Amino acid sequence: MKSNADTGKNKIEKSRNKIPEFPPAGPGKCSKPETAFFGFFRRRISAMLSGRKQTRRCGRKTNNQKFMPLTHTKDLFAKALKGKYALGAFNVNNMELIQAIVEACEEEKAPLILQISKGARSYANPVYLKKLIEAAVSLSNVPIAVHLDHGDTFELCKQCIDEGFTSVMIDASHEPWEKNVEVTKKVVEYAHKYNCSVESELGHLVGAQFDEGEEGGAHSTSGHYTNPDEAVQFVKETGCDSLAVAIGNSHGAFKFKGEQHLDLERLKAIKKALMDANLGDYPLVLHGASSVPKYLVDEINKYGGQMPDAQGVPEPDIEIARRVGCTKVNIDTDLRMAMTAGIRKVFAESPKEFDPRKYMGPARTHVKDLVRHKVKNVLCCAGHAFD
Ligand code: 13P
């Protein structure tokens, strides 16, 4: 279905300024994270009152009985929906990215999802990624879930489920309705046997779907937007646990020409339709949620890069998406840009430098600063790690 999104400035402003009446909105600004001291006692008391044992991580037994000390994606979702904050789903493909993201979330006490695409698996090798994540989990206290981003076949999803991922995305959104339903159902059936959750996508984003981000090169002026009634039917037919929506979003660093045009009214309509159909506070996923911050574009361009027309989703729109009910917010491009800016700066200022630690280290700090900002000021999940 083609979009009828209004790209006019007035409508965008109106949509941004309007507090979403439905569902009950989450906070406009993120509240201050609680202190470790207060948090410890609040958790002890609430565990005592509810008579439950305090558990930090549940882990997940996989079909071949491997055990990864991860936290279930569905547990993170349940808490995020209750607490009205969004979870950052950060794409990773190397050690520095994993370290930066996990350290940032550790410092901000934020739960997090590390996501791995097919491209990341072939770049780094699944075994390296798994071991790196296990190292990160063992060195940190915050709940971490691991998700397959844009799985394009049942076989790839099955592999990741067998490896112990806590959730997988099956993306057959480019296929006709019947095929999308069929393959999503097949993945759901297998995943649920092993207590793994499934994200699927309806409608489709413009630009590359499979990890190529900015190489997609297209701008999201058209594309198949998610229809609210079809979303209800799709969720009911497939049994998927969360749904990625297409509302004018796209991957990469060149999302819009001129003014942004996420169809936030459509997002509200999708959420409402799912709730009206007795599917509860159903978790929606926003792909292409990088905001392509101007300071990073400027820094990359200043130090020899060429990203003149880069543009992402403005942070106020991500905030609205969070308040309306996007529980998982996917971020990849901003991480790539932060890392690139950090490396470019060292190369430009110290051309004699050739020790990778001297440029990967500052790049890692750049990524960490960006993630701290996101979880604290945009997603509002800071301080919720031990809810
Ligand atoms: P960005 O390219 O906007 O970071 O989106 C990433 C994404 O949606 C991965 O699935």
Image (spheres, rainbow, N blue to C red):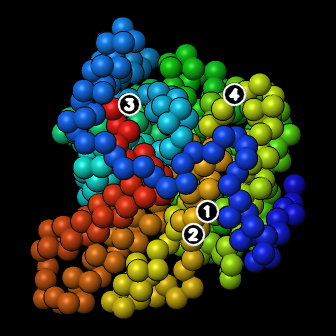
CA distance for labels 1 and 2: 6 Å
The residue where tag 2 is placed is: 314
Left or right of residue 277, residue 287 in this image: left
The residue where tag 4 is placed is: 280
**Helix or strand or loop: what does disc 3 sit on?**
loop
Q: Where is the C terminus found, in terms of image quarters?
A: top left
Q: Is residue 23 above or below residue 217?
A: above
Residue 194 location (% of width, % of height) = 50, 18
Q: Could you tell which of marks 2 and 3 lies nearer the N-terminus?
A: 2
Q: Are marks 2 and 3 in contact (CB under 8 Å)?
A: no
319 or 141, nearer to the observer: 319
CA distance for labels 4 and 2: 28 Å
Can residue 282 be spotted in the picture? Answer: yes
The residue where tag 1 is placed is: 317
Q: Could you tell which of marks 4 and 2 lies nearer the N-terminus?
A: 4
Q: Amino acid at mark 1?
A: Asp
CA distance for labels 3 and 1: 26 Å
Q: Are marks 1 and 2 in contact (CB under 8 Å)?
A: yes
**Helix or strand or loop: what does disc 2 sit on?**
loop
Q: Could you tell which of marks 1 and 4 lies nearer the N-terminus?
A: 4
Left or right of residue 217, residue 384 in this image: left
Residue 257 location (% of width, % of height) = 68, 81
Mark 2 or mark 3, whichever is nearer to me = 3
CA distance for labels 2 and 3: 29 Å
Q: Amino acid at mark 2?
A: Pro
Q: Are marks 4 and 3 in contact (CB under 8 Å)?
A: no
Residue 279 location (% of width, % of height) = 73, 27
The residue where tag 3 is placed is: 387
Residue at horizontal 66 percent and vertical 33 percent from the top: 282
Q: Are marks 4 and 2 in contact (CB under 8 Å)?
A: no
Q: Does the numbered disc 4 mark a residue whose Cβ is under 8 Å from ligand 1? A: no
Dot 2 alpha-carbon crowd within 10 angstroms: few under 14, some 14 to 19, many 20 or more: some
